[in-house]
Amino acid sequence: MNIVLVGPAYPWRGGIAHSTALLYRHLAKQHNVRIITFSRLYPELLFPGTSQKETGLNPAAVTAEPLIDSLNPFSWIRAARRITFAKPEVAIFKYWHPFFALCYATIVSIIRLNTNSRILFICDNILPHEPFPGSRLLTRLAFRSVHSFIVLSGTVRNELLRLQPGAQYRLVAHPLYELFTGSMSKTVARKRLGITDSQVLLFFGLVRKYKGLDVLLEALPIILQSLNLRLLVVGEFYEDEDRYKEQLRRSGCEHSVTIVPDYIPADQVGLYFCACDAVVLPYRSATQSGIVQIAYQFDKPVITTDVGGLAEAVEHGSTGYVVPPENPNRLADAVLEFYKKKKEPEFVRNVRKVKRRFSWDAMVEAIEELCAP
């Protein structure tokens, strides 16, 4: 098939850009694929981080045409014309936030008017983690002319069907982030990071309220009563970092926590995952999280909360633990059980078995089924 893939791609940073590149890589094995990406993603006023672009090399070595300015409707029309000129049999859009709904709705409408292309949306989210007035209306507008959808968790599927009953869709588990390489032993990783502790947990990713870092920090004093443990907090803060540091000072746990308040380039991600025993995701809410797939890529167990699609990816008592959200005591109990019962070897074996179902082949097959002539 002749396919156009629309979404963030290098030099834009983050999990969605990485997954766009990986999808291109796997589709291109059997199909003719080109990527149309953004010349401007978020306006700076709406972006709380330091930079929206990768600071390292292109991790997937794919090329994309930066045609879409999220704030310039004329660029939407130009991009749509470029796509219609290519006469794709399928146009695939990566969808994750209603900020892009008007842009996508415009491009899709022009494609539908001028071609017979099938329109498919791959939805990481349907609604944003932090909803705003009009988000449902905008999402409905974006979905109005879409033929079919791929959703990455049961929670996303349920949101889709509430907004668009009868939508044609496939549920496909979020595939692994294969571009994160550089696997190494714990000993080597910890030496490079200057960690001498024998027990290490990792909280990884952008720090936002819904991710519940404060809940994990509240559980930490309970954990440290029984264990000598190092917590790595690695990721750029989209909130006031000092608030979390003050929480640590009040609890007296600041000496057991290492904070790396930066976005981590793709070629350095493996270093932090290889250094830990398990990854902790104490989310208050979620649809799904690509952090689970990064953890599984490096054969790491995950301790998470029962929100959104996280419990679909983590098998309680097998590849990690699933605990109630906003419950520091239960979170602490899971960490203590993990270490006291020496669960890591068993969980790692199970992760290696389970992660086979998080394949890009399943994603490609779903696309081919939904878009078959």
Image (cartoon, rainbow, N blue to C red):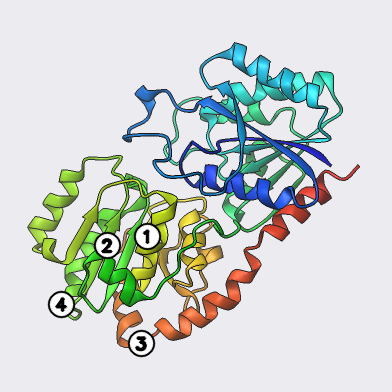
Amino acid at circle 2? Leu
Q: Is residue 177 visible?
A: yes
Disc nearer the start of the sequence (2/1) = 2
State which mark lies toward you, 3 or 1: 3
Residue at screen point 37% across, 63% down: 271
Is mark 2 in CB contact (under 8 Å) with mark 3? no
Q: Which residue is mark 3?
A: 342
Measure how far apart labels 4 and 1 are at the Cα level.
22 Å
* Quadrant of the image containing the N terminus: top right
How far across and how far down the image is residue 6, in percent?
65, 34
Disc nearer the start of the sequence (2/4) = 4
State which mark lies toward you, 2 or 4: 2
Q: Is residue 166 visible?
A: no
- Labelled disc at residue 225: 4
- Within 10 Å of disc 2 (Cα), the crowding (few <14, some 14-19, many 20+) is many
- Labelled disc at residue 306: none
Q: Is residue 281 above or below residue 157?
A: below
Q: Which residue is mark 2?
A: 232
State which mark lies toward you, 2 or 3: 2
Amino acid at circle 3? Lys
How far across and how far down the image is residue 39, in percent?
53, 24
State which mark lies toward you, 4 or 3: 3
- Within 10 Å of disc 3 (Cα), the crowding (few <14, some 14-19, many 20+) is few
Left or right, 105 with respect to 49, comes to right
Residue at screen point 20% across, 60% down: 258
Measure how far apart labels 3 and 1 are at the Cα level.
24 Å
Q: Which residue is mark 1?
A: 325
